[in-house]
């Protein structure tokens, strides 16, 4: 691997990808972001990509002026993002935008047979069947960046998939672990995004607080590893030392452990199958006092229960759920909805959409639009 493109370079995963890329001496062909124009300019000057994709044309215009003295070409909109995903120079594309906006660029990168280092889980939740089928058809690799999925991927490596009994998907439980939903119903955005173990973007931090993140990861795991919902068990593990596990038919369980540092799974997706020295530190087992495990409290994390139900029912329901959740989370962050109403908003949006059993890409994009419209209209 010599050259990569990074979609969402200004975000939490994007910035850590740049650190890993510099550590590995990789070149960057394209970067993409949107609102953080100051950082986009700084990254473009430092990394000199051939292309910079900026979502809003007004931001792109500002950056075209700011970067006029460089060779960096600035493009905008979905066409720009898709061009950034398809640039011939890049062998791998790290998809680290937040939300289902990542779907179409990911499909473009797959069609160009690039390695997809997938952080953007919403893409697989929205269109897992289509994305995995296209990857199989093109022979494109999809390597997980999400820490749990990277762990499972590592535990599965070299084993016969038929020998897998179940995947144990671990979850820290987020900042409100152990609390009743009523206690946190009116929690402020600042409290919801204060994750105990990981420093992440705002949307995924709120998803961790509602446990919707684990629901999205449940669906992501079904698609990445070709397992049924019955083969996935969610397990609360507050210390985030074991990043997930695989149980085999003989009862043997393999686990992957490491520090809570996303630069490790990001780097592994880039260097796989090789392992190289990374920026993540070592775990000191002697200092780990104890590790805890417990079953999730589905009654007080209804978003997780809802996501598992959507996973089982399939069709366009996961796409609708994920899109409505994006909208509900952004309304919560804008203080338009209380924390506890995120679930109610998503559930109401799901009730309003037309169910499609085997959706095409167009049907999924229409579902995404309709679910957002319903979630925007929801009144708590
Ligand atoms: P952030 O919110 O920190 O970053 C999101 C990135 O996406 C930013 O660079 C943002 O640009 C960019 N972006 C958003 N919308 C657009 C758009 N329309 N066009 C172009 N760029 C856009 O999120 P995270 O880094 O935390 O998460 C990114 C993805 O990775 C999510 O899908 C998340 O679920 C997943 N993930 C994250 C983990 C983490 O530790 N953070 C762990 C596992 C998975 P700008 O800010 O400039 O507008
Ligand atoms: Mg994760």
Image (cartoon, rainbow, N blue to C red):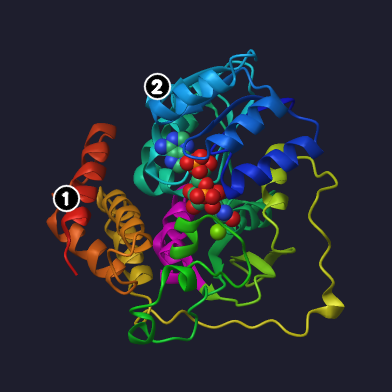
Q: Name the residue under label 2.
A: 79
- 245 relative to 113, above or below: below
- 62 relative to 249, above or below: above
Residue 358 placed where, x, y %? 24, 42
Q: Which of these two is toward me, 342 or 89?
A: 342
| 160 with respect to 364 (left or right) | right
**Can residue 312 be seen from the camera position used here?**
yes
Helix, strand or loop at label 2? It is: helix
Q: Which of these two is toward me, 69 or 350?
A: 69
Query: In the picture, residue 339 is in which quadrant?
Result: bottom left
- The quarter in which the N terminus is drawn is top right
**Can residue 272 be seen from the camera position used here?**
no
Q: Nearer the viewer, mark 2 or mark 1?
A: 2
Residue 20 placed where, x, y %? 74, 42
- Of labels 2 and 1, earlier in sequence is 2
Q: Which mark is residue 17?
A: none
Q: Main secondary structure of the magenta part?
A: helix
Q: Is residue 223 magenta?
A: yes
- 105 relative to 307, above or below: above
Q: How crowded is mark 1: few (under 14 residues within 10 Å), some or many (20 or more)?
A: some
Q: How far apart are marks 2 and 1 (CA)?
A: 29 Å
Magenta-tinted stretch: 207-234
Q: Residue 355 carries which label?
A: 1
Residue at 47 percent across and 39 percent down: it is: 35
Residue 34 placed where, x, y %? 47, 36
Q: Which of these two is toward me, 131 or 248?
A: 131
Helix, strand or loop at label 1? It is: loop
């Amino acid at each position: 691997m010599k050259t990569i493109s990074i979609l969402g370079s200004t975000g939490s995963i994007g910035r850590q990808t740049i650190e890993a890329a510099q550590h590995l001496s990789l070149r960057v062909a394209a970067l993409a972001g949107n609102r953080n124009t100051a950082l986009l300019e700084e990254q473009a000057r430092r990394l000199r990509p051939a292309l910079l994709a900026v979502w809003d044309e007004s931001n792109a215009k500002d950056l075209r002026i700011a970067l006029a003295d460089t060779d960096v070409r600035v493009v905008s909109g979905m066409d720009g993002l898709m061009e950034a995903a398809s640039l011939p120079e890049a062998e791998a594309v790290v998809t680290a935008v937040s939300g289902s906006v990542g779907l179409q660029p990911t499909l473009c990168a797959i069609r160009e047979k690039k390695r997809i280092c997938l952080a953007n889980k919403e893409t697989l939740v929205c269109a897992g069947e289509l994305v995995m089928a296209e990857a199989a058809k093109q022979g494109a690799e999809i390597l997980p960046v999400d820490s749990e999925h990277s762990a499972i991927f590592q535990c599965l490596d070299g084993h016969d998939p038929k020998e897998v009994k179940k995947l144990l998907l671990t979850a820290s439980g987020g900042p409100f672990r152990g609390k009743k939903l009523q206690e946190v119903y009116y929690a402020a955005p600042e409290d919801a995004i204060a994750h105990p173990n990981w420093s992440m973007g705002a949307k995924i931090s709120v998803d961790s607080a509602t446990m919707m993140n684990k629901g999205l990861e449940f669906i992501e795991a079904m698609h990445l590893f070709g397992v049924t919902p019955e083969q996935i068990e969610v397990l609360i593990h507050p210390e985030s030392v074991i990043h997930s596990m695989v149980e085999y038919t003989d009862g043997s369980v393999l686990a992957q452990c490491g520090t809570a540092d996303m630069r490790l799974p990001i780097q592994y997706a880039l260097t796989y199958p090789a392992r190289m020295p990374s920026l993540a530190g070592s775990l000191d087992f002697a200092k780990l006092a104890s590790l805890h495990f417990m079953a999730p409290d589905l009654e007080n994390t209804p978003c997780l229960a809802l996501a598992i139900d959507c996973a089982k029912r399939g069709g366009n329901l996961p796409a609708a759920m994920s899109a409505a959740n994006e909208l509900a989370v952004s309304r919560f962050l804008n203080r338009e909805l209380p924390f506890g109403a995120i679930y109610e908003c998503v559930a109401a949006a799901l009730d309003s959409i037309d169910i499609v059993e085997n959706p095409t890409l167009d049907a999924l994009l229409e579902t995404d639009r309709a679910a957002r419209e319903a979630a925007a209209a929801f009144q708590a």
